[in-house]
Image: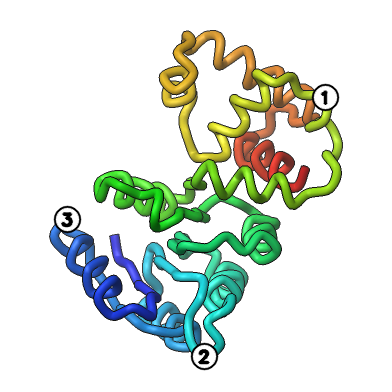
Amino acid sequence: MRVVIAEDLAILREGLAGLLAERGHEVCAAVADGAALTEAVAAHRPDAAVVDVRMPPTFTDEGLRAAIELRARYPGTGVLVFSQYVETRYAARLLADDPGGVGYLLKDRVGDVAEFVTALERVAAGGTALDPEVVRLLLRSSHQAAGGVASLTAREREVLTLMAEGRSNAGIAAAMVVTGGAVEKHVASIFGKLGLPPAESDNRRVLAVLRYLEG
């Protein structure tokens, strides 16, 4: 996996680069601001970019805005936002077109290096990796449930929340301590209520997550 890192704190930037290199991944560039991130991705076309939210010059939302630009210009590059902050407005925009290949993790909630690397690999492969707290804040920022999301049961919403975190059916079953068959029934019900029939060209899990975040 080829990675570009955008982090203004030099110690954390170099630390991330070292951790990824130790695990056999190639760090193409490690930069300190959004402009340099855009240039690095254009030059190296990495599999994924790790992006902080608040970077120079204003330390507000430069990183997240750069991430949105990257998704538009280079949809094949996964973007993992790795920050202490949740900027709900821009985070919703980042996930709006297609949450596949997007992740958002909070620095103070990642206590295991393997967990971080696994999430980054999932994002690089086109999957989704969202911290539960990010999902909660995105939902709280929404004023009204949209479409069929309002009709989901509490259990179905729990399944969809875990799905939004990027978990497989097996991972959801383990987290909820239920059988895989039970999860499959919940997922089928969710797809039905959200009006997502089987289709070869559509990833229904991604579309369901998108409806959930919009709701």
Left or right: residue 138 versus residue 124 is right
Residue that carries the numbered disc 1 in the rendered image: 151
Mark 1 Cα-neighbour bin, 10 Å: few <14, some 14–19, many ≥20: some
Q: Nearer the viewer, residue 32 or 40?
A: 32
Of residues 173 and 86, which is closer to you in this image? 86
Numbered label tally: 3
Residue name at image x 51 percent, y 71 percent: 53
Q: Nearer the viewer, mark 2 or mark 3?
A: 2
Which residue appears at 33% of the width and 67% of the height? 3
Can you see residue 201?
no
Secondary structure, mark 1, is helix
Label 1 sits on what residue type?
Ser
In which quadrant will I find the N terminus? bottom left
Q: In the rendering, at what x and y percent does residue 98 appear? A: 64, 53
**Residue that badge 2 annotates:** 57
Name the residue beneath numbered marker 3: 23
Quadrant where the C terminus is found in the figure = top right
Q: Could you say where residue 180 lies in the image, as x and y percent from the top left?
A: 48, 12
Three-letter code, disc 2: Pro
Kind of element beneath mark 3: loop
